[in-house]
Image (cartoon, rainbow, N blue to C red):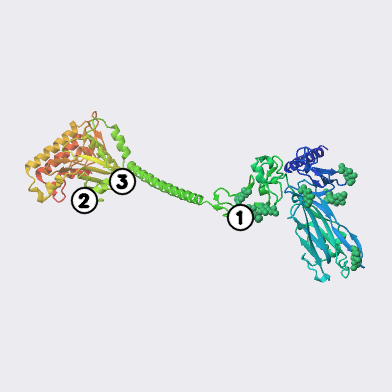
Amino acid sequence: MRIRGMALQFTITGVLLLAAVTAATELPIAKPGCQDRCGNVSIPYPFGTGEDCYYDSKFLITCNHSFNPPQAFIGKSDLNFTEITLDGKLRLTQYIAKDCYNRAGAPTESNTPWINLPPQGPYVFSDTDNMFVAIGCDTYAELQGFREDKNDTYVVGCISKCSNEKYVPNTCSGIGCCQTSIAKGIKYFEVSLSSYTNHTGIWEFNPCSFAFIIEEKQFSFFPSNLSDLKEVSEVPIIVDWSIGHNNCETLEKNKMSNACQGQSKCHDPENGSGYICKCLDGFQGNPYLPNGCRNINECSDPKVARNCSHNCIDTEGNYTCSCPKGYHGDGRIDGERCIRNRSSVIQVAVGIAVGLTSLLMGITWLYWGYNKWKLMKLKEKFFRQNGGLMLEQQLSRREGPVTETAKIFSAAELEKATDKYHESRILGRGGFGTVYKGTLTDGRTVAIKKSKTIDHSQIEQFINEVVVLYQINHRNVVKLLGCCLETEVPLLVYEYVANGTLYDHIHDKSKVSAFTWEIRLKIASETAGVLSYLHSAASVPIIHRDVKSTNILLDNSYTAKVSDFGTSRLIPLDQVELSTMVQGTLGYLDPEYLHTSQLTDKSDVYSFGVVLVELLTGMKAISFDKPEGRGIYRRIFFVH
Ligand SMILES: *[C@@H]1O[C@H](CO)[C@@H](O)[C@H](O)[C@H]1NC(C)=O
Ligand SMILES: *[C@@H]1O[C@H](CO)[C@@H](O)[C@H](O)[C@H]1NC(C)=O
Ligand SMILES: *[C@@H]1O[C@H](CO)[C@@H](O)[C@H](O)[C@H]1NC(C)=O
Ligand SMILES: *[C@@H]1O[C@H](CO)[C@@H](O)[C@H](O)[C@H]1NC(C)=O
Ligand SMILES: *[C@@H]1O[C@H](CO)[C@@H](O)[C@H](O)[C@H]1NC(C)=O
Ligand SMILES: *[C@@H]1O[C@H](CO)[C@@H](O)[C@H](O)[C@H]1NC(C)=O
Ligand SMILES: *[C@@H]1O[C@H](CO)[C@@H](O)[C@H](O)[C@H]1NC(C)=O
Ligand SMILES: *[C@@H]1O[C@H](CO)[C@@H](O)[C@H](O)[C@H]1NC(C)=O
Ligand SMILES: *[C@@H]1O[C@H](CO)[C@@H](O)[C@H](O)[C@H]1NC(C)=O
């Protein structure tokens, strides 16, 4: 029940809504509160059935309700009509003039219909929409008219003759049918017919003559009309109406601008008097009512909407076609239609290009960054592998004054300095690795010590050497300029000592002659000075642990430069001796240290003693080809 009730309510609401919508869309044609309809005939303003409803009394319409449906009459006349149009037309009907005979030629029926339009009124028979027609094969038709404005009666007519039906064509051309136009300004007319032979001889197919003024559009002639018109009594006729006697020009001159309402325009009826109003193109409604002309939504007409290639947009009094965003053009099917914007094409292209470029740049940047990161990781790995951390620890633990900061060389710098570690740059090889001669970019000649393998113990020695040399500032000690830990094997950079090792000068026969006693003494004293400095003058005592003739380098003025601190040890001040693993070179190692593994500075003194003996005798520390020389060291050798 409830649901049905609700459904009913909805239906009612829907119907009411629909009614409201229909009412809203239907434009008013009469003044508010005025009857706009009489039976089947609508009555638009300026016509009206009452005083407040018409423009003036000449537009009075009488609606007689005693007819069913009620009939509308012009004014107080007996002229009823079927339609009023706002473009100045009124359609009514008129009797046909007939002149009929029997087979014998005696007249049986005849009439002369007439219509008199109200005088002084706005009505006149339309000369453009009507014509005078006579139909028959023995017919003389006459039209008598009266033109009120010219006080002039005029008569026109036409004759139609034919002896046989077969000569009658389908057009109204003088055979069976004739027609003429009518004059302007006719307010009254009368139609009369006559015959020459009372239709004798043609009676079989044409017993009557017919004549009438008829709405041109409604008329078409057929040979059958020669007989069938007998049954027809009325034909439609058009009457023009207009307002007043002034034409538009005069109205404008007299500033009667309110004659036609908004969105409408004044028109002169064709050579008639007065004026009529018409809504502007794109508007419809009653131009005589205020706000009577309303915009037409052209787009709701599918025929018009089809003129647009995309969107139809209704405008006030017109419509336009529009294109979607990113398109231009008039959007008309018979025009440019819609064209994709070049700018948007360019925008899209530029967008894609920018996108691709930034993507490419991004990838490149990432790749570059990744490579850099990889290289950094590698360098970091090498740095760690090469004891960089150890060095950092050692240096941070170190006390005493910093003499000079060792420079950290880049791998590339040293590679360039040594001509990519070229064979010709090799100064010497040993268990520790290879020493290259290099030239730095600032022109300094340096010796670059490159570890042979990535053996951890060797790396420790490298770091040890760096740490030890860091403590030393002595002119008879080879100066450490810096190091490079970025490469796979660590590199140490020293000052370049040009004149080779002491060993070379003692044992090379070609050099011995120049190696005078003064020089030998100088070297001995300088080396002794270095050892003295290491053992007692350095901030932390240092034991060299590998004093030998190959580790004493000589420069051009035979100044001694003690080198190779790879195995040297720093001895804390409160300790006299240190337990270590035995390290050193056979022939220079002292037997006590070999036995006890207790390292003291005396080990260096012993080794220096061996060097002194070398300087004095020119003999090698260990000689296997001289049995008497072997005796001194046999014990050591065997023990080891
Ligand atoms: C009047 O209208 C009714 C219904 O709308 C129709 O049946 C009738 O034929 C019409 N009469 C005339 C004379 O147009
Ligand atoms: C309506 O028509 C009838 C019959 O033709 C006529 O007698 C009557 O007077 C008319 N009424 C008006 C108001 O004209
Ligand atoms: C006019 O009224 C008559 C009746 O009085 C009717 O027969 C005729 O059809 C009407 N004509 C028009 C055009 O309504
Ligand atoms: C034709 O009809 C008229 C009357 O309308 C008559 O006077 C005349 O004699 C008739 N003519 C013939 C040939 O019948
Ligand atoms: C119209 O013309 C007739 C004679 O043709 C004349 O008697 C009459 O007075 C004229 N009427 C007017 C209004 O001019
Ligand atoms: C002439 O005959 C045709 C066809 O029979 C018909 O449709 C037409 O209405 C007739 N003309 C007139 C004026 O009645
Ligand atoms: C009709 O009007 C035109 C101008 O609009 C004019 O040239 C012409 O002479 C007029 N014709 C008549 C019959 O008044
Ligand atoms: C309506 O617009 C079209 C072009 O869009 C133009 O050609 C036409 O003249 C316009 N009509 C009116 C009444 O403005
Ligand atoms: C639109 O289309 C109709 C029908 O296709 C055509 O007659 C008309 O000229 C076109 N243009 C306008 C502006 O309506």
Residue topped by disc 2: 425
Coordinates of residue 274 in the picture (x, y in percent)? 71, 46
Q: Quadrant of residue 580?
A: top left
Q: CA distance from mark 1 to mark 3?
A: 76 Å
Q: CA distance from mark 2 to mark 1?
A: 87 Å
Q: Quadrant of residue 6?
A: top right
| Residue drawn where x is 31% and y is 40% of the image | 387
Residue topped by disc 1: 333
Instruction: Give 491 or 230, whichever is nearer the viewer.
Output: 230
Q: Does residue 625 sit above or below 460 in this rendering?
A: below
Coordinates of residue 20 in the picture (x, y in percent)? 75, 40
Quarter holding the N terminus is: top right
Q: Does residue 115 sit above or below 589 in this rendering?
A: below
User: Neighbour class for label 2 at 10 Å: few (<14), some, many (≥20)?
Assistant: some
Residue topped by disc 3: 487
Of callouts 3 and 2, the N-terminal one: 2
Coordinates of residue 396 in the picture (x, y in percent)? 30, 33
Of callouts 2 and 1, the N-terminal one: 1
Q: Is mark 1 within 8 Å of ligand 9?
A: yes
Q: Is residue 146 left or right of residue 358?
A: right
Quarter holding the C terminus is: top left
Amino acid carrying mark 2 in the image: Arg
Q: CA distance from mark 3 to mark 2?
A: 19 Å
Q: Secondary structure at mark 1?
A: loop
Q: Nearer the viewer, mark 2 or mark 1?
A: 1
Amino acid carrying mark 3 in the image: Thr
